[in-house]
Image (spheres, rainbow, N blue to C red):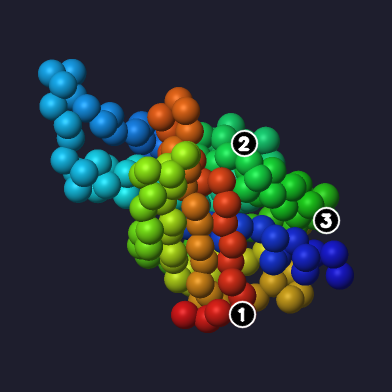
Amino acid sequence: MCLLAVVTAVPVTACASGREAVERPTAARDDGHRIDPDVERQAAEKAALDAYSGYLAASRTAGARSDPRAPELSRFLADPLLTRVRLSIRDAKEHGAMRTGTLKSDPTVTAVSLDAKPATVEIQDCLDTTGYRLVYAKDKRPVPGSGGGRHLSTATATRYPDGRWLINSGTTHRDQPC
């Protein structure tokens, strides 16, 4: 069934603060003094985790409304992940399905590369999707084969030239329970 493919392609989402991606910290203050590298790293980690939380919340909201063009998606996501998320929501909608429920997320930063061009932050999460389902919009029956579980999920936040941190790649590793 085509919907099974949608289940594996649709990003797993969760509740979050809904805050916009945080702008990048500046490397030097106006008075010419350098910012402590630890402070810059902590700011990057916070900005990346805020972007990740925003991505999860925006994806969940867009999936529940079956709205692949939801404007909040582009506040937290960039391509290629933005296009993947939009296509997954559109495919579910075309098959009369939508996402519903909640899931648990507790992300952690696993790597920070501020010297890379562009700067990136790697995030790892153990997503519990047992309460998050793909259901038929008409009668809310679960789509066969769309059961959840606890799986490792990874994402990359990238700092864009305008200073925003956006999530541009992410994968749920269904073969790696956690």
> Which amino acid, mark 3?
His
Residue under the image location 82 percent in, 50 percent down: 94
Residue under the image location 53 percent in, 81 percent down: 177
> Which amino acid, mark 2?
Ala
The circle on residue 70 is 2
| Disc 1 residue crowd, few under 14, some 14–19, many 20+, Cα 10 Å | few
Which is more N-terminal, label 2 or label 1?
Answer: 2
Q: State how far apart marks 1 and 2 are (Cα).
A: 30 Å
Q: Position of residue 26 (x, y in %)?
A: 28, 29
Q: State how far apart marks 1 and 3 are (Cα).
A: 26 Å
Q: Image height check: is 71 above or below 139?
A: above
Asked whether residue 66 appears in the rendered view, the answer is no
Q: Position of residue 59 (x, y in %)?
A: 57, 48
Q: Position of residue 136 (x, y in %)?
A: 74, 61
> Which amino acid, mark 1?
Asp
Instruction: Look at mark 3 in the image and give the residue it sits on.
Output: 95
Q: On the picture, is 85 further left or further right than 138?
A: left
- Taking depth in this image into account, of 49 and 129 the one nearest to the observer is 49
Q: Give the number of the mark in front: 1 or 3.
A: 1
